[in-house]
Every structure is written in C-alpha cells, then in structure tokens.
Image (cartoon, grey):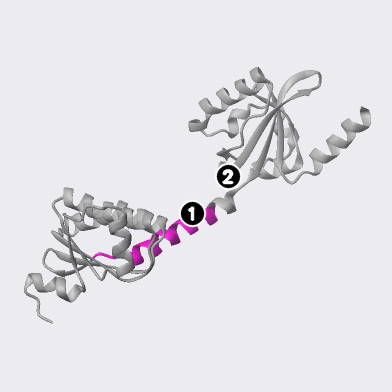
Amino acid sequence: MKMDEEMYRQIVESSADAIIIQQDGKFMYLNPSGVKLLRAASSEEVIGTSVFEIIPEEYKEFIIRDANSVLEENKPSEIIEKQLKRFDGTLVEVETICTPVIYKGRTAIQSVFRDITQRKETERTLEKVAKERNALVAPVLPILEGVAVMPLVGSIDDDRAKYILEHVPVKVQEQNVHTLISDFSGINTLDETVIDCLFQTSAVLGLLGVRSIVSGVRPEVAQSVIQLGMDLSLIQIFGTVQQALREFGVKG
C-alpha cells in the first residue's frame, strides 16, 4: 500500500496537467504543473489559501454546487470548461474534472486542470474563418434600387445553409432590399436538407415583405424541390438572372 501511495505521488508530481487537492474550500496540495498554470511563486505560497481566489465571480456559484455534488454523491464530476484566475491576475481557459479522494485521513476534492487556451483560440479562429467563408458564399449585392442578387457559388452544406437562413434576412433589411434574386447557377452540390433551408429563407423574406426570385435552378435541383413538396407560390423562378431583371425593365 505504501508503494502504491509513493507511485501515485510520483505520477501526480510529474503530471503535465495541473492537479490540486482542496478541503473546506482551501488549497491542501498543488503539483508543479499547478504552480506553473496558476503562476504562483511556489506551492507553499498557495497552501492554506482559499481556492476561490482563482475562481472568477461568475463561476463561483456553479463551482460550489459542483463541489457539493462531488462530495455528496461520492463520484467524479463531468468534464467542464471554464476560466481560472491566475495569481498574477490573468485568466486561463481550462478543462477540468473533480474527483472525491481521501487526503490525510479526510475527504477532499482532487481537481485536474488542463490548459485549453490554444485549443479555444484555434476553435475561435476556425469559427471566424467559417463565418467569413459563409459570407463570401452568400453575398447580397445591390444591383438596382431596392433590388439585390445573392449569387450562390460552390457547394452549400448544412452550415452554410444555416448561415444564409440566419444572416441573409438581416442583410436584406439593412440594405432596404424589397426584392432578392437568389441565383443557383453556380451551385455544385445541393442536398435536400440544404434546399429546405434555402427555401425557408425565402419564406422568412416573404414574412418581411421581401419578394423572392430564384434563378439558375438546374433540372436535378428542380426535381428535388418537387419531391420535397415545397410551396413555390411565394417564389418566382427564372432561368437566368438576366431574365429576372427584365421584370424591372433591364434589357440585356
């Protein structure tokens, strides 16, 4: 048993993850990775201080509830993401799990923290890139007073279709557009889920008093629309954008 405890201590001391043990809301143990993550001068400086010094105000109520649950149910918490306040005042994003343990003969909580700052920054960057890409896929381009064209290009997947549904009605209102021509001629692939989302966009535009015109619909897309039983009564369909513009007296 003593050897097991020694092995466990060595594993915890050498762990790349920050590990702390708390009792009654106070630090009782902090491994070297924990000292580094929290930017403390040493573990001795931290021992005996309140763990709430590293918990931002908005997380405190949740942390108390989670700690009580771990002790009462005597089982680990779920893995959660949150921020910690380092001892130098900066914030760090972490992934953590809490486990009930016996420390020096008393029940305690062991918390393992993993720094996910880089991962979260990558996720935010990818989300930003996706939004920018989606904006390029569905631009609303004014061509006449109150009339705009939305040329759809490339492949429209579920995420892009949802972006169109959420953002195009807003763009249309911001630009005082009363007629939107959605041109499908540049679409490579379009499945039924995406078609449904795009036609939902037209329905939303109709509720906003915006006239929807669709152009460039390929035969295979038209067949899918018919099979889905979609209501086309609110949408005018033309072969090309040029044909649609003739409705407004534009010759070409």
Name the residue at 16% across, 54% down.
233
Tell me which corner region of the image, top left, top right, bottom left or bottom right, holds residue 46: top right
Q: Position of residue 196 (x, y in %)?
A: 32, 53
Residue closest to the eye, 181 or 137: 181
Q: Main secondary structure of the magenta part?
A: helix
Name the residue at 31% across, 51% down.
166
Secondary structure type for disc 2: strand
Q: Position of residue 121 (x, y in %)?
A: 53, 54
Q: Is residue 127 left or right of residue 97?
A: left
Q: Position of residue 195 (x, y in %)?
A: 33, 57
Question: Is 204 located above or below residue 217 in the figure?
Answer: above
Residue at image mark 2: 92
* The disc label shown at residue 124, or none: 1
Three-letter amino acid code of the residue under disc 2:
Val
Three-letter amino acid code of the residue under disc 1:
Arg
Q: Position of residue 130 (x, y in %)?
A: 43, 60
